[in-house]
Image (cartoon, helix red, strand yellow):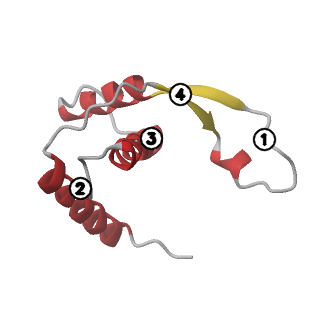
Amino acid sequence: MNINIRELKEIMNSVLEKCILNNGEIIQTEEDNFWYIDLDDGTNFVQEPDNLCVGSLNDDYKSLEVLLKNERNINILDLDRIANVIKFISLEIGRSTDKHL
């Protein structure tokens, strides 16, 4: 499968803009910790993953906010952090009776 990064950027922008239009610029959540599984383990269907660890939405988001201030270089983990934040946005919208996409 080929993933066009530019197209993905446009798709993400469209989805996030619709989210802002329908819900405002801030989504609030009480959640923080989550089970994280390394994608290499998550795509191996021969054996069950044994490397579960706990992730933190708060830590991920704070690490991403620092990028806005150019206080550190972007790295590969930022893609994982963005994915985790997007999952929580989806979770909160899905749980809510007054938020929608």
Q: Could you tell me how far apart the alpha carbons at marks 4 and 1 are, in whole angstroms?
A: 16 Å
- Quarter location, residue 11: bottom left
Q: Nearer the viewer, residue 8 or 73?
A: 8
The numbered mark, 2 or 4, whose residue comes first in the sequence reads 2
The numbered mark, 3 or 4, whose residue comes first in the sequence reads 4
Q: Can you tell which mark lies on residue 16?
A: 2
Amino acid type assigned to the residue bearing label 4 in the image: Gly
Q: Could you tell me how far apart the alpha carbons at marks 2 and 3 are, in whole angstroms?
A: 15 Å
Direction from residue 41 to residue 11 in the image, left or right: left
Picture coordinates of residue 33 (x, y %)? 50, 24
The numbered mark, 3 or 1, whose residue comes first in the sequence reads 1
**Residue under pointer 3:** 84
Q: Nearer the viewer, residue 50 or 94?
A: 94
Quadrant of the image containing the N terminus:
bottom right
Mark 1: give few (<14), some (14-19) or many (20+) Cα within 10 Å: some
Amino acid type assigned to the residue bearing label 3 in the image: Asn
Direction from residue 48 to residue 17 in the image, left or right: left
**Residue under pointer 4:** 55
Of all residues shown, which one is farthest toward the right? Answer: 46
Amino acid type assigned to the residue bearing label 1 in the image: Pro
Q: Could you tell me how far apart the alpha carbons at marks 1 and 2 are, in whole angstroms?
A: 32 Å
Quadrant of the image containing the C terminus:
bottom left
**Residue under pointer 1:** 49
Q: Nearer the viewer, residue 41 or 54?
A: 54
Q: Could you tell me how far apart the alpha carbons at marks 3 and 4 are, in whole angstroms?
A: 9 Å
